[in-house]
Image (cartoon, helix red, strand yellow):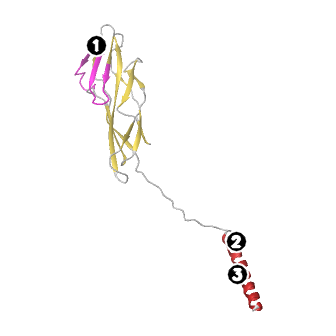
Amino acid sequence: MIRFRHILMGALSAAAVAGFAASAHAQASASQSTTASVTIFRPILLTKDSDLSFGTIVRPLAGSGTVVISQTDGSRSLTGSGALLNTGAPNTQAAPGRATYTVSGEGGQTFAITVPPTFNMTRAGGSETIQVDLTPTATTGTLSNALGQAGTATFGVGGQILVESTTPSGAYSGTFTTTVAYN
């Protein structure tokens, strides 16, 4: 019986050493499954639907007047002196109204709207300028629909100008850049 115990103890010791060696080998390397993912958006596009136009304005005899084009509905108003005309020289002046834009891109996504705070319009045939202060309807927007579908949104840009009794008469124009970008 002693011999059987000795053989049994030897077998158990060998099994323990083999188990320890297997455990040590298992610790020498490890593996883990990893997931990769990506979300693809369609490009964001900006289309100008209409330009910003202050229409035709009669400068004041004295003092000044501020002409405002509403960014929300394109209506025109005047505070101070001067007058607003509903007609201008044929084919030279657009009807007064705000600039309007359509944004298209990936549905449900937010975007930023960037418009410069001011820009200058220059008199045709001269170097005189009128500063335009710009106001967008918003600085951010959200495209309609959901991810995986095309979405759209619209916004407007209005502004204001100061017309003084000394402002030279003539046709003024200038450009500004409006930018949209996914957030």
Q: Residue at x 34, y 52 (%)?
A: 149
Q: Residues within 10 Å of mark 1 (few under 14, many from 20)?
A: many
Q: Residue at x 23, y 24 (%)?
A: 90
Q: Residue at x 66, y 68 (%)?
A: 29
Does 3 appear in magenta? no
**Closer to viewer: mark 3 or mark 1:** 3
Q: As shown in the figure, which amino acid type bears the numbered disc 2?
A: Ala
* Label 1 sits on residue: 82
Would you say the residues marked 3 and 1 are in contact, meaning their CB atoms lie under 8 Å apart?
no
Would you say the residues marked 1 and 2 are in contact, meaning their CB atoms lie under 8 Å apart?
no
Quick one: SS at disc 3? helix
Question: Which image quarter is the C terminus in?
Answer: top left
- Above or below, 52 relative to 30: above
Task: Tell me residue 43's x, y (percent).
Answer: 41, 48
Question: Which image quarter is the N terminus in?
Answer: bottom right
Task: Tell me residue 42's x, y (percent).
Answer: 40, 50
* Label 2 sits on residue: 24
Q: As shown in the figure, which amino acid type bears the numbered disc 1?
A: Gly
Quick one: SS at disc 2? helix
Which of 86/33 is in front?
33
- Above or below, 30 relative to 39: below
* Label 3 sits on residue: 15
**Closer to viewer: mark 1 or mark 2:** 2
Q: Is residue 6 left or right of residue 79?
A: right
Quarter of the rendering containing residue 182: top left
Mark closer to the chain start, 3 or 1: 3
Residue range (magenta): 67-93
| C-alpha distance separating marks 2 and 3 | 14 Å
Mark closer to the chain start, 2 or 3: 3
